[in-house]
Amino acid sequence: MINRPRRTRTNPFVRDLVRETRVSEKSLILPIFIEEGKNIKTEISSLDGHFRYSPDRLFECVDSALENGVSKFLLFGIPKNKDEKGSSAYDDNGVLQEGLRTLKQQYKDKIYLISDVCMCEYTSHGHCGILDGQTVNNDKTLEYLNKIAISHAKAGADMVAPSDMMDGRILSMRNALDHENFLNTPIMSYAIKYASSFYGPFREAAGSAPSFGDRKSYQMDYHNVKEGLKEAIIDESEGADILMVKPALSYLDVISKLRQNTNLPIAAYSVSGEYAMIKNAAKAGLIDEYGVMCESAVSIFRSGSDILITYFANELAKAIKKGDIG
Ligand code: PBG
């Protein structure tokens, strides 16, 4: 027989050789939630195995991640006080800033810190910007996002990640960072972020659900992919260093189309709802958690993503070390 595809599947050695997708713990980013206060480590009920840490206890999470070889973190802040303008988001003594300073002091250059730049956790109304009546005012919000990004960079953020979906924010933030001499602080843009029901558990974790309406006037309609490419091309032209697609698993087609349309690195954010689905289906005895976790993560890389932001970062790093994926 001329064609016997099984020949290259006969043993682990040859399967290793023909493997098309390589996965490394170096490509993983772990999200961490930082809560204002002291001596806090509270389990997040919607995100099994994840906690909100106060800045003084962050080391508990970072130490174990480093042991697994996970050294990049995406940080979210949970402030005590919220107001109309989300002022604790750009307060130099805000919770995220304090977390950044603490971690940088403790770990110096052993870790890489990416800060989520957004307002929804900090505004009393839970929207991702400054309101004019019932709608988010795009251009007014840009000034605030710039202040947040600069404040994060000053506190030690190695990279900033705007997740707000305002128009023009990348160019505006690039200029603002450059003006403050943060010339080498990269921007990872949440370029193609859909208005998604998969964010549910996160909104519980971060207390960031909008108090009225939804985010459909700024986050994308999940029927659209060409529009996603438009967003990505705009962000690239405005100086984004990495383009993100979010969520990941229901959007593998978007990742693969983006792969064909950009030479920038692509990050995929496998969001809270994706994690919760796997965790809870496994708990119900319906699927094998480990197997589904591995298969899902590899599918995201296979679709063309270079970087994966995931709540499974530690477990995936262990699976890579064991040789089950990678
Ligand atoms: C906004 C933000 C959200 C997530 C990350 N950044 C929530 C939202 O847009 O409503 C969701 C992440 C997840 O679900 O894991 N700051």
Image (cartoon, rainbow, N blue to C red):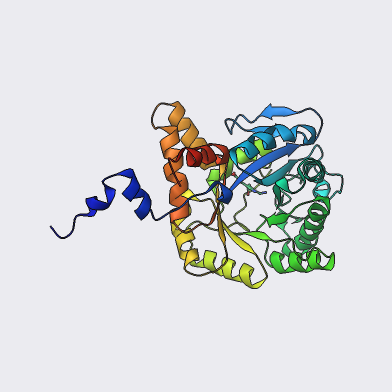
Q: Is residue 1 visible?
A: yes
Q: Is residue 192 visible?
A: no
Residue 129: give x, y in percent of width and height: 73, 55
Task: Examine the rendered structure and indicate whether residue 113 appears above or below residue 304.
Answer: above
Residue 300: give x, y in percent of width and height: 47, 51
Task: Examine the rendered structure and indicate whether residue 166 appears above or below residue 70.
Answer: below
Residue for point 53% across, 50% down = 247
Residue for point 48% across, 50% down = 23
Q: Which residue of the protein is positioned furthest toward the left in this rendering?
A: 1
Task: Examine the rendered structure and indicate whether residue 129 appears above or below residue 176.
Answer: above
Q: Depth check: 275 or 6 in front?
A: 6
Quadrant of residue 63 within the rendered picture: top right
Residue 98: give x, y in percent of width and height: 82, 42
Q: If the image is split into quadrants, where does the N terminus sit?
A: bottom left
> Would residue 318 be found to the left or right of residue 324 on screen?
right
Residue for point 62% across, 69% down = 236
> Would residue 224 be found to the left or right of residue 1 on screen?
right
Q: Depth check: 25 or 313 in front?
A: 25
> Would residue 269 be found to the left or right of residue 113 on screen?
left
Quadrant of residue 252 within the rendered picture: bottom left
Residue 210: give x, y in percent of width and height: 67, 45
